Image (cartoon, rainbow, N blue to C red):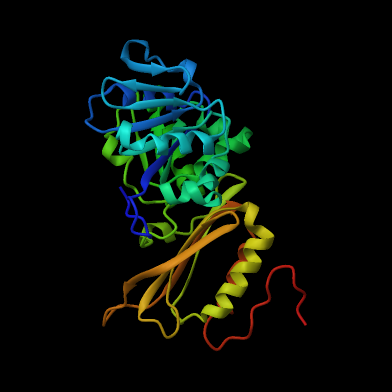
Amino acid sequence: MTKSSTGARPKIPVTILTGFLGSGKTTLLNRILKEQHGRRIAVIENEFGEVGIDNEILLQNPDEQIVEMNNGCICCTVRGDLIRILGELEKKHRKLAFERVIIETTGLADPAPVAQTFFVDDAIGDAYVLDSIVTVVDAKHGSLQLDEHHEAQEQVGFADRILLSKTDLVAEEEAAALIDRIRRMNPRAPVKRVHFGETDIRELLDVRGFNLTSILEIEPAFLEDVAHEHDDEIGSFAWRDDRPLDMAKLESFLDGVIRFYGQDLLRYKGVLNVAGEDTRMVCQGVHMMMGGSAGRRWLPGDKRTSTMVFIGRNLPRELLEQGLALCVEGAPEPVAPGVAAG
């Protein structure tokens, strides 16, 4: 579990499992529920009737919407409000003794509202920490789904881990082309091929990809700027500068960016070289919510540089790059989006 900043009971890590209709989420979920993996996992399932667990039930109380599996997992229905279900689980945490939560969304769901739950409700934020979003993509139908469905693109854009299923049903060239497209849309999420949900569960847990206060570094592979071959609504780019940043200017500019473009910003994160600071500044956000924390100390010989990665819908790349460049120490004040230059 993740330690609470208040020194109270450790927070319960949560993984959101998403993917378009037919991608293989339920197959993976069934495996998690049935496999003897030795972990106490609470699974929140919103299509409960489709999960084939009839022979796995140890305890069921219809009034509580909780089913306990013979491998230690717990399954809950989400026919009600997610905040309420999470609250009920938290109250029963000592009795049920689960270690983490996995939430499976419907195939047509945008994962953003589920993710935002952990940042807009104080009680949920105190009890849980959002670890990552794992997205399953169907190799057979994924390209068409990305072409035709906004939700499929959102699911890829938000992901911290991407599992590519049904690769045995397509030619290697087709699978490779889809992987290349996914990586252009979201270069920060590793893509792994899976067969019938056969994935080491350890690769899906403790990713710490979505923790707004975790200490993150951006790998060089994330910074590769490759032209799109598809006219996808969701794309990504990285900005990098070696000059120290003026924190006041940066906060003012990003506040304007979030205010005007927040709904189109799916994920954004950076490791920043701030003037006068001997540690890296780490920032990360989703839509309108952004958080920051101190990262590792700069060591003698380190190249002090700032890097930010943006993933979103039709982002104004030139405006963002120009504004960020004006946030360096000694530069003129940047003009926030929506404010006319004087």
For the point 59% across and 68% down, which residue is it? Answer: 254
Residue 26 visible in the picture: yes
**In the depicted view, which residue is nearer to us: 335 or 281?**
281
In this view, 316 is above or below 336: above
Give coordinates of residue 115: x percent, y percent.
51, 45
Residue 173 visible in the picture: no
Quarter of the image with the C terminus is bottom right
**Residue 220 found in image quarter:** bottom left
**In the depicted view, which residue is nearer to us: 78 or 264?**
78
In this view, 211 is above or below 136: below
Q: Residue furthest top?
A: 55
Q: Residue furthest bottom?
A: 330
| Relative side of 51 to 257, left or right | left
| Relative side of 203 to 181, left or right | left
For the point 49% across and 55% down, which residue is it? Answer: 226
Give coordinates of residue 267: x percent, y percent.
52, 54
Give coordinates of residue 233: x percent, y percent.
62, 46
Give coordinates of residue 106: x percent, y percent.
53, 28
Query: How many labels were placed on the picture?
Result: 0
For the point 56% across and 50% down, which residue is it? Answer: 120
In this view, 252 is above or below 168: below
In this view, 143 is above or below 160: above
**In the depicted view, which residue is nearer to us: 140 or 244?**
244
